[in-house]
Image (tube, rainbow, N blue to C red):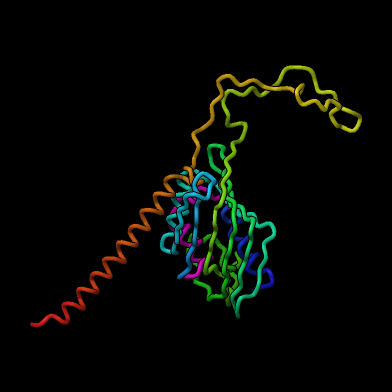
Amino acid sequence: VGSGQGLIRLLQFSGILSANDNFQKKLQLSWWKELIKDYFAPKAIMKFTLWKDNSRQEAKPFEIGTAILPRFFLVTAQSGVKSMSLSLDGARERLYSTGHSIIECVTAVWTYKYTNGYTVTLRGPLTVHVIISAPTPPSTGSPGSNGTASGGGSPPSALLRFEDFQFDALYHDKYIAVEHIEGIENTMNGPTPDVGPHGQSQNTDRSDEQRVPVERGSVPLGPVNAFGIPQATMRCLEVCLTYILNGCWRAHISSSWQRVWARWPT
């Protein structure tokens, strides 16, 4: 690791998220569990920070463990996300220690494509720690990402996994495909623009370009909240975080009472 192997592994993960031919599988919790097991170390943490309304006034930081990650991705898919992808322009990988590298990208883009025509991009710095770990035995329904050949070849002796995955979504943008805007005419009437001999338009005055009036156009309801993710996904993270904190608190109280009870005279 340290010479691009971890970056290739991260792009493989992005490729599986972006595939459109397995959308029905993405609606199954078991599929996400296998994917997370293949790509994340058992004690890995995804640190996900979201900023409200593209401002630096209010943020929601989340630390998502491997027990919660499959549910996080499942709820996101159930909210209408048909594909996701990571754009890593300018990413660099460097060796951190033996069998451990760090991928850093200050201009990463996490793109979500929705079934209702919206595309939402989260933009910000990304840092991923990649380690060499022992592979897990493949199981039925696995996304097939653990390096095992489709023809039944022997499993790899080692596997690259993400130990720490941190993404700070400083900004988010929302777009919608034109074909999902109701009320827009598909054809335009009027003269054909004057085109030069090499295909360039000879009319540089954009005030005369053809326009399509939209009097009663409508678009689907936006799929994300002010932080750039589906509200159901946000609620899932908040509920899971509350559950974990309450569980840790109960465990702490229980152990404290056990120590008190042990010192109590009988």
Q: Considering the image in quadrants, where does the C terminus appear?
A: bottom left
| Residue 200, magenta (yes or no) | no
Position in image of residue 133 (x %, y %): 54, 75
Residue 69 shows in the view = yes
Question: Which secondary structure dominates the residues rendered in magenta?
Answer: helix
Position in image of residue 200 (x %, y %): 85, 32
- Vertical order, 235 against 262 (above or below): above
Q: Nearer the viewer, residue 204 or 198?
A: 204
- Vertical order, 33 against 257 (above or below): above
**Residue at left 42%, top 46%?**
232
265 relative to 79 in the view: left or right: left
130 relative to 200 in the view: left or right: left
Q: Considering the image in quadrants, where does the N terminus appear?
A: bottom right
**Residue at left 58%, top 19%?**
215
Residue 21 shows in the view = no
For this orientation, the residue located farthest to the front is: 57
Q: Nearer the viewer, residue 89 or 220?
A: 89
- Vertical order, 263 against 193 (above or below): below
Position in image of residue 55 (x %, y %): 53, 47
**Residue at left 44%, top 61%?**
64
249 relative to 216 in the view: left or right: left
For this orientation, the residue located farthest to the top is: 190
**Residue at left 45%, top 54%?**
72
| Residue 20, magenta (yes or no) | yes
Q: Would you identify the image quadrant in which residue 11 lies?
A: bottom right
Q: Which range of residues does the magenta coloring cover?
A: 18-42
114 relative to 195 in the view: left or right: left
Position in image of residue 264 (x %, y %): 13, 80
